[in-house]
Image (cartoon, rainbow, N blue to C red):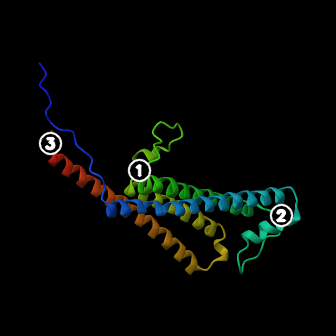
Amino acid sequence: MKLNDTSTPDIKKPIRPLPNLIFMSRWLQLPLYLGLILAQCVYVYNFWAELYYLIGAAVGNQDALKHILDAVAIPGAIQPTKLNETTIMLVVLGLIDVVMISNLLIMVIVGGYETFVSRMNLESHPDQPEWLSHVNASVLKVKLATAIIGISSIHLLKTFINAAAYDEKTLIAQTGIHVVFLLSAIAIAYSDRIMAGTHSHASNIKNPH
């Protein structure tokens, strides 16, 4: 025989006006994310414009070639006069740089909105990013740090390709900045791992099996 459940269900209390106003203030971030979407559009336009000039230079368009050579020119260095392998590589690295920054924008827009503004309820969507299912502020920080390291790597590679055009101080400074980014990402990931372990340990103590 089943006993009657005499417990009363939890009744949700209405949020008081001031806490509700403070909580609703999270929507002030929405224009910021919309602005980042517009910035994404600018990057898309820039990507296709540079790709257009690269293809034009490859087929012999002199105006496109001049634009490409000016884009990869380094002050104080001998400017190339034709489209060679190094020039193409520098332009392609610039395009990859745009893509990686675009990926960074997507992580900030989607992950930030999901974490700080409102749930998107994408669990059943086939295109839901794998990382979005367990996104939080800590995961977002680690992924952003990793993306910044990738962007820094591209810039460092572009510098090393034309290492002869830079002085030793510039090369050391850029390498040092990249190492600082790398160490910062490791520190962020390690601190988040410690915090996650501490939280898990506290949960096990509170709810022992």
> Is 166 above or below relative to 91?
below
Residue on which disc 3 sits: 208
Kind of residue indicated by mark 1 = Val
Q: Quadrant of residue 161?
A: bottom right
- Image coordinates for residue 203, horizontal then vertical, percent: 20, 48
Residue in the image at 58% along x and 63% along y: 35
Residue on which disc 2 sits: 64
- Image coordinates for residue 168, horizontal then vertical, percent: 57, 79
Residue on which disc 1 sits: 135
Foreground: 178 or 52?
A: 52
> Is 167 above or below relative to 133?
below
- Image coordinates for residue 112, horizontal then vertical, percent: 46, 57
> Is 101 above or below relative to 171?
above
Kind of residue indicated by mark 2 = Ala
Q: In front: mark 1 or mark 2?
A: 1
Q: CA distance from mark 1 to mark 2?
A: 43 Å
